[in-house]
Image (cartoon, rainbow, N blue to C red):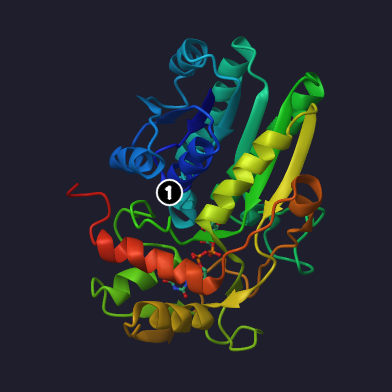
Amino acid sequence: MILLTGGAGYVGSHVCVALLDAGLDVVAVDNLSNSNKASLERVQAICGRSLVFRQADICDEEAIYQILRAYEVTAVIHLAGFKAVGESTAQPMSYYENNVVGTMRLVSAMTRASVKTLVFSSSATVYGRPTYLPLDEKHPVGPTNPYGRTKHFIEEILMDLHGSDDEWRIGILRYFNPVGAHESGLIGEDPLGVPNNLLPFVAQVAIGKRDKLHIWGGDYDTPDGTGVRDFIHVVDLASGHLSALSHLKQPGVLTVNLGTGTGCSVLEVVRTFEAASGRPIPYVISERRIGDVATCFADPSCAERLWGWKSSRSLTQMCTDHWRWQMNNPNGYRGT
Ligand code: UD1
């Protein structure tokens, strides 16, 4: 049995599908602070298999310990965490508490239950401002906001954990920009309030919930002046977790990028989404967003070398699938 923290969330629900489709049994743990249990009902409909859901907080060590024991968990995929950069600057302590302390409690519960295989959801945000591109795993880290620092500190804590007990098998996955949705249109990203990230905002403009997109900066040193990112289809990202899990056979810590290796500009995303949806995306070029970098994309070759994993879905597919989810679920999981 695999325990998935943050299992009802955007990435979590897609990882559940990957695990169930691979024949693994899943107990999804989520405190539902930024997710909806309906996502897991949809996951079961997609896979035609059931999973276990337990509402619990990773900060509650005893509850996690009991779940680990009750379901004879052999490995944990840890996705739960706060993830809004702006909010992390306003409320750093709650980010450190929830993300860093929460992970420490989870690890304590795992240690008590002798479960020592862990896949952790980190972020390319740990690299901070790139000094060279593409970003490989050896690029120096230097996150520029509290959210990024929580990911960086957790990575360090996990290294120390392995240093103290070399039975641990740990995979640290540095995500680039996850977008898109499962092709069924049943599960996808369901942000609360105004989306911070590009694709959810674009999708809400396309469906008429928002007037226009603000493109944060049109004067970057990039081919069209807008920011360039490595957008990765969430289904490809999810399969990376399965690859990590099935290859963590030896004790050790592996830190691996999950990206496509291709940078796409904000304007390219807008054009591709317009084509995929058949809807216009009105936009204005606005001031740069504080903390943004011009260009960020992965060298994803390590994951391919180690695990034979690479992404396969195009930007068109990302936009098509994101749009299908948005069309079928204009209010996300609310109202289901
Ligand atoms: C952001 C976070 C990153 C986090 C990731 C999760 C920041 C600075 N970084 O990455 O830490 O791991 O999300 O997915 O917030 N854009 C617009 N208009 C919008 C929204 C975005 O022009 O309304 C632009 C941004 O300026 C950027 C690109 O779209 O150039 C991607 O932005 P976003 O989706 O927020 O991702 P990141 O900033 O790369």
Residue shown at 68%/67% (left/top)?
297
**Is 197 located above or below residue 315 in the figure?**
above
**Is 328 located above or below residue 16 in the figure?**
below
The amino acid type found where label 1 is placed reads Tyr
Q: Which residue is mark 1?
A: 10
Frontmost residue, 218 versus 41: 41
Residue shown at 55%/48% (left/top)?
238
**Is 196 located above or below residue 288 in the figure?**
above
Please state the total of marks drawn on the protein image: 1
Can the viewer see residue 212?
A: yes
- Residue 128 in the image, given as x and y percentages of width and height: 67, 59
- Mark 1 Cβ inside 8 Å of ligand 1: no
Neighbours of disc 1 within 10 Å: few (<14), some (14-19), many (20+): many
Frontmost residue, 69 versus 159: 69
- Residue 126 in the image, given as x and y percentages of width and height: 66, 52
Residue shown at 66%/45% (left/top)?
173
Under circle 1, the secondary element is helix
- Residue 237 in the image, given as x and y percentages of width and height: 58, 52
Q: Residue furthest left?
A: 335
Can the viewer see residue 33?
A: no
- Image check: 150 left or right of 283? right
- Image check: 89 left or right of 254? left
- Residue 204 in the image, given as x and y percentages of width and height: 31, 69
**Is 133 located above or below residue 166 in the figure?**
below
Frontmost residue, 160 versus 188: 188
Residue shown at 31%/64% (left/top)?
326
